[in-house]
Amino acid sequence: MRLAFFINLAFTVVEALGGWWTNSIAVLTDALHDAGDSLVLGTAWYLQRVAMRGRDTRYSYGYGRYSMLGGWLTSTVLFFGALVMLGVSIPRLWEGSSPDADRMMIIAVFGLAMNGLAARMLHGGGSLNERGAYLHLLEDVLGWAAVLVGAVVIRFTGWTVIDPLLSICISVFIGFNAMRMLRRGTDILMQGTPRGMDPQAVRARLMAIPHVKDLHDQHAWTLDGDLTVLTVHLLVEDIDLSLARKVKADAREALHAMGIHHATIELEWGNEHCGLEHH
């Protein structure tokens, strides 16, 4: 992860200089994309080390949410960067700038090689951070393939409008993905119901457990998009302690089968009122 980060960061600098060298707005726009990926890789590398700390008195659930926060901030930077690049690229459709196609091809081949190498390093990574970083780098490889094809077209046809069109397409692609990540990150920050979870299905599964009469105060959220947390109060029949333990174990097993990693279950008997029935 560290080596992939430094390779990507170094190439981002080379790419920005290459955009100026070739007078290509498409290359400069992809430099923005690589800068964002450098942030992603750097954050992922740092968070791999942070995650080893585990939970402590400051963060009782651990440091997993830092991963999401890093991605959220990166997406914000990328989204506004994409808007800037759109503002620069669109006027070039009519200005008729002339990028150097031969130099563009050189930069594109170099970009394919460097990003391909970094992606190969992370291929097959086991952690969520590594898999996410690998997908970002794979996007870069595809972006450079598009730049290379565009440079070849400009070289043999003289259609220089291809350069700003490529920049606009790359900017829209970056902006769309950044907005999608921002929405997901905001849902996590606001403790929204985790994606793919049906609260009614969870309720029905818990109500099917023997001796459970009702439930309330059911809340579910995710710490980082991966680890799901749930709390619930189960109202049970007038049962003894051994059966109560069985109900709780069955509930925990059922929730785990539904993808819930951390469940806090409170049992209540008969006419007991906890004061949270309507919360």
Image: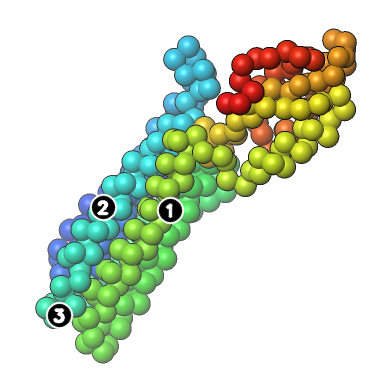
For label 3, the SS is helix
Can you identify the residue that label 2 sits on? 80
Q: Residue at x 56, y 39 (%)?
A: 193
Residue 50 picture location, percent across and down: 44, 26
Residue 232 picture location, percent across and down: 67, 25
Residue 97 visible: yes
Marks 1/2: CA distance? 14 Å
Residue 231 visible: no
Residue 205, picture quadrant? top right
Which residue sits furthest bottom? 157
Return the disc, 1 or 2, that comes first in the chain's sequence. 2
Relative to 24, does residue 264 appear above or below in the rendering? above
Residue 244 picture location, percent across and down: 83, 16
Pointers 1 and 2 in contact (C-beta within 8 Å): no
As drawn, the label of residue 107 is none
Residue 219 picture location, percent across and down: 60, 30
